[in-house]
Image: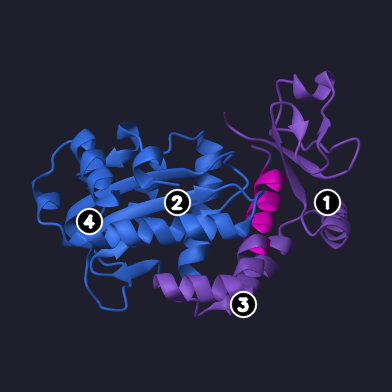
Amino acid sequence: MNPQLQVLIALQDILLLIRDSKDPSSQRAMDKIGFELTNIESLEATKTDLERQLKPAIRSEYTRAQQRYGRIVAPVINSICYGCFVKIPYAIDGADDRNKTLYRCENCGMFLYWVDK
Amino acid sequence: MKLSETITPGRINLNLTATTRETVLEELVGLLHLKPSARKALLQTLQTREELGSTAVGDGIAIPHCRSLVVGEVLVAVGRSVRGVSFRASDRRRVKLFFLIVAPPAGDPGDYLIILGSVAQVARLLAKDRRLKAITTAQHFISLVKELEE
């Protein structure tokens, strides 16, 4: 996998974890199950560390996508970008270097990750 | 969602060999049979989740979980450790029964919480069930889960 894509995926997963951890209804549900959410600050620190690993050009795209969509990478499942639900052109979707090269959706601009099927 | 309908024999390991929190997560993620790059990304997210607070819920049970971009559907893996693994449980008991739950980021977070809740409920019943110790095959494990869910 492209190393920068790996960082972007980790960032997106952490952003989701931070959002879920701060959501009052999620917190209540987690507490009811028995999970302790005691260290939210550690997530912010990990997020900052990961952001530092992004190349400047990708980091600015990441910031833009995060502000615009609240997420940065869109999964591709059955040739559909799950960021905007538009079909990915075959020239990209059929490429051998999917996930090895950093591709972006031509429609919504989000970075693309082809999910294992 | 019923746990018995989600778990498959290939995603159950009744003899985990891992002895640490890190290696048990690796062993559980291995049961999902993902590509190496996806496995690595998922492991990183699960480890970050554990830093937030242990997913051990007491009674020798842990439910490591996260929502991750690397999966396209809810995946569940189950592991049993005969000796138990120290997993920073609040009751300080070693964890012997693990349920790994990974869900895609899309979809209602409420659904994900419902899945977690229902797995936790069945896990607690399982941990108290004396038959669990005697189970040696994944198919028998699924049958027991099914029985407890009814």
Q: CA distance from mark 2 to mark 1?
A: 31 Å
The residue carrying mark 3 is A24
Q: CA distance from mark 3 to mark 2?
A: 21 Å
Q: Chain of mark 2?
A: B
Look at 29% across and 40% down and name the residue there.
B12
* Mark 1 neighbour class, 10 Å CA radius: few under 14, some 14 to 19, many 20 or more: some
Disc 3 marks a residue whose amino acid type is Pro
CB under 8 Å between callouts 3 and 1?
no
Asked if labels 2 and 4 share a chain, the reply is yes
Q: Is residue A6 magenta?
A: yes
Instruction: Give whichever of discs 3 and 1 has the lower sequence position.
Output: 3
Disc 1 marks a residue whose amino acid type is Ile
Q: CA distance from mark 1 to mark 4?
A: 47 Å
The residue carrying mark 1 is A58
The residue carrying mark 4 is B126
* Mark 2 neighbour class, 10 Å CA radius: few under 14, some 14 to 19, many 20 or more: many
Q: CA distance from mark 4 to mark 3?
A: 30 Å
Q: Chain of mark 4?
A: B
Q: Chain of mark 1?
A: A
Q: Is residue A59 magenta?
A: no
Determine the colour of chain B: blue
Front disc: 3 or 2 = 3
